[in-house]
C-alpha cells in the first residue's frame, strides 16, 4: 500500500513538472508594437507622419541606447538604409 502511494505521488509530481515545461508565456504588447508591424520595410521618416500616444525611440545602426526597459515605450530599429527593420516594446 505504501509503495502505491509513493508511486502515485511520484507520478503526480512528474506530470506537474512536464506541464510547466510546455507552458508558453506570450509577451505583452503594452506599447502597440504588434499593430504597427506593417511599418517594417518602410522608411524611418514615415514615423514623423504618425501621432503616437506613447514614447517612441528610433534606433539607428551604431547609435548608443540606454539599457533601461520601459514597457510603454515603442522602440523602432532602422537599418543602414534608414528602413524600419523591427518594432518592439521597451
Image (cartoon, grey):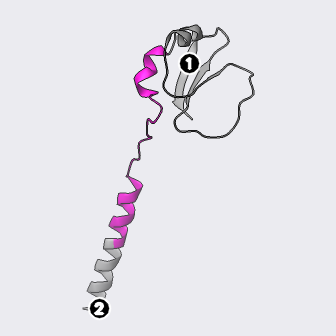
User: Which residue position is annotated with label 2?
Assistant: 2
The reply to whether the magenta stretch includes residue 21 is yes
Magenta-drawn stretch contains 79: no
Q: Quadrant of residue 26?
A: top left
**Residue at the image point whose x is 40% and y is 24% from the top:** 35
Q: CA distance from mark 1 to mark 2?
A: 61 Å
- Disc 1 is placed on an element classified as strand
In the displayed structure, 67 sits above or below 85; it is below
Precedes in sequence: disc 1 or disc 2: 2
Nearest the camera: 54 or 87? 54
Q: Residue at horizontal 44%, vertical 21%?
A: 36
For this view, does 47 lie left or right of residue 7? Answer: right
**Horizontal side of residue 22 vs 39, given as left or right:** left
The magenta-colored residue range is 13-39
Quarter of the figure that contains the C terminus: top right
Q: Position of residue 5 (x, y in %)?
A: 28, 85
Amino acid at each position: 500500500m505504501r509503495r502505491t502511494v509513493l508511486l502515485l505521488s511520484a507520478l503526480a509530481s512528474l506530470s506537474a513538472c512536464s506541464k510547466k515545461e510546455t507552458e508558453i508565456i506570450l509577451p505583452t504588447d503594452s506599447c502597440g508594437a504588434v499593430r504597427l508591424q506593417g511599418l517594417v520595410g518602410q522608411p524611418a521618416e514615415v514615423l514623423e507622419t504618425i501621432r503616437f500616444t506613447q514614447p517612441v525611440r528610433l534606433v539607428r545602426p551604431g547609435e548608443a541606447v540606454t539599457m533601461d526597459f520601459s514597457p510603454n515605450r515603442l522602440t523602432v530599429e532602422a537599418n543602414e538604409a534608414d528602413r524600419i527593420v523591427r518594432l518592439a516594446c521597451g
